[in-house]
Image (cartoon, helix red, strand yellow):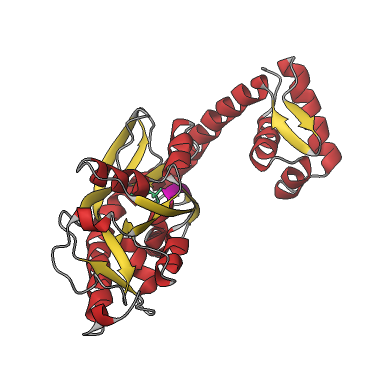
């Protein structure tokens, strides 16, 4: 491997990430024959094939996967060095790769926007997926920081809370339970329930709440996103438990109500996390510091959404048919 060049590793990393020689060539402003030549030389150095092609798709071989991990380490070190130098020059430049669980999409882009205004030299990328996928990315050390709704037990990680994440019971504003006080969880499980998909943190937390009380939810439908669930609630298909943050985009519509259920809200927290032992880049360290400041503002916004939602209820909404 001593004869391999950084350029070859860069080409290899781009193909592994993009799953295509053509797209890697485009990203690196190289011709496709140059890309193929670099990979041929690298493969000769390694002495084992790095990619295999099945149909039109390219997959990493075992040796390719090992080399990919090694490349990530090497490039992380370089990025860290570049940022350290930029920091010495008094500039905060570099890249911030953030991966967040689906529900964090209601505040993460806003956080990044405010952060980028403070550090215009920082380039950001945001991956939004469910808890299970975020944990896989964390275990593979694919990003700089992760935001999720519970400290990861499955992976050895440093996790720190920075924001409240109340889970509330949502119903359409015309639902008969809307104006009732202290509804029992037993009454809630009589209603058709709309559940997030398997692997969702929201789903794990709501199922746990009811099973700890010896109750089983009557799941009518499983949907893969908070927005789909909100639409299904509005459509009268059932009720659900979602993060209060999901009301952010509902404010102009005001078609959902937060039910007053005993034991709710479920008090969860948002955490930022990263693999234990990982040395945070300077940009990631700046983002962590910034998260603590921004959390206060986001907390206020989140409780305002819930207040606005319920203050718009029609006075006799419980007379209307579901
Ligand atoms: P989810 O995670 O978006 O995957 O449901 C949210 C959470 O863990 O609270």
Does the stretch in magenta take in 152?
Answer: no
- Asked if residue 43 is positioned above or below residue 244 in the image, the reply reads above
Q: Residue at the location (50% across, 39% down)?
A: 79
Q: In terms of image quadrants, where is residue 20?
A: top right
- Can the viewer see residue 119? no
- Asked if residue 232 is positioned above or below residue 274 in the image, the reply reads below
Which region of the structure is painted magenta? 96-101
Q: Main secondary structure of the magenta part?
A: strand
Question: Residue 232 location in percent, x, y?
Answer: 45, 66
The residue sitting at the top extreme is 47
Nearest the eye: 176 or 257:
176
Q: In terms of image quadrants, where is residue 173?
A: bottom left
Question: Residue 168 location in percent, x, y?
Answer: 26, 60
- Asked if residue 156 is positioned above or below residue 88 in the image, the reply reads above
The residue sitting at the right extreme is 33
Please state if 149 lies on the left or on the right of 97 as rendered.
left
Quadrant for the N terminus in the image: top right
Question: Residue 260 location in percent, x, y?
Answer: 18, 65
Number of marks present in the image shown: 0
Nearest the eye: 55 or 231:
231
Question: Residue 50 location in percent, x, y?
Answer: 72, 24
The residue sitting at the bottom extreme is 315
Quadrant for the C terminus in the image: bottom left
Q: Residue at the location (39% across, 64% down)?
A: 110
- Asked if residue 260 is positioned above or below residue 200 in the image, the reply reads below
Q: Residue at the location (71% across, 17% down)?
A: 46
- Can the viewer see residue 212? yes
């Amino acid at each position: 491997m001593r004869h391999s060049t950084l350029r070859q590793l860069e080409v290899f990393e781009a193909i592994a990430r993009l799953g295509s020689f053509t797209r890697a060539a485009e990203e690196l402003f190289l011709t496709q024959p140059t890309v193929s030549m670099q990979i041929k030389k690298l493969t000769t150095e390694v002495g084992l094939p790095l990619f295999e092609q099945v149909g039109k798709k390219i997959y990493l071989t075992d040796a390719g996967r090992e080399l990919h991990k090694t490349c990530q380490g090497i490039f992380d070190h370089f990025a860290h060095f570049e940022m350290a130098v930029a920091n010495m020059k008094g500039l905060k430049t570099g890249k911030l790769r953030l991966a967040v669980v689906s529900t964090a999409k209601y505040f993460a882009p806003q956080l990044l926007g405010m952060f980028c205004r403070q550090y215009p030299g920082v380039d950001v990328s945001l991956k939004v997926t469910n808890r299970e996928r975020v944990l896989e990315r964390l275990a593979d050390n694919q990003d700089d920081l992760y935001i999720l709704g519970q400290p990861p037990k499955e992976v050895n990680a440093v996790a720190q809370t920075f924001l409240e994440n109340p889970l509330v019971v949502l119903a359409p504003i015309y639902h008969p339970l809307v104006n009732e006080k202290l509804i029992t969880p037993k009454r809630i499980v009589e209603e058709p329930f709309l559940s997030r998909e398997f692997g969702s943190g929201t789903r794990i937390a709501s199922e746990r709440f009811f099973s700890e009380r010896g109750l089983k939810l009557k799941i009518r439908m499983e949907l893969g996103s908070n927005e789909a669930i909100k639409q299904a609630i509005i459509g009268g298909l059932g009720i659900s438990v979602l993060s209060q943050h999901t009301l952010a985009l509902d404010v102009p519509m005001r078609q959902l109500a937060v039910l007053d259920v005993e034991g709710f809200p479920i008090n969860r927290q948002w955490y930022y996390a990263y693999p234990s032992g990982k040395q945070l880049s300077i940009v990631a360290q700046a983002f962590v510091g910034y998260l603590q400041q921004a959390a206060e503002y986001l907390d206020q916004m989140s409780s305002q959404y819930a207040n606005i939602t319920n203050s718009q209820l029609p006075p006799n909404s419980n007379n209307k048919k579901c």
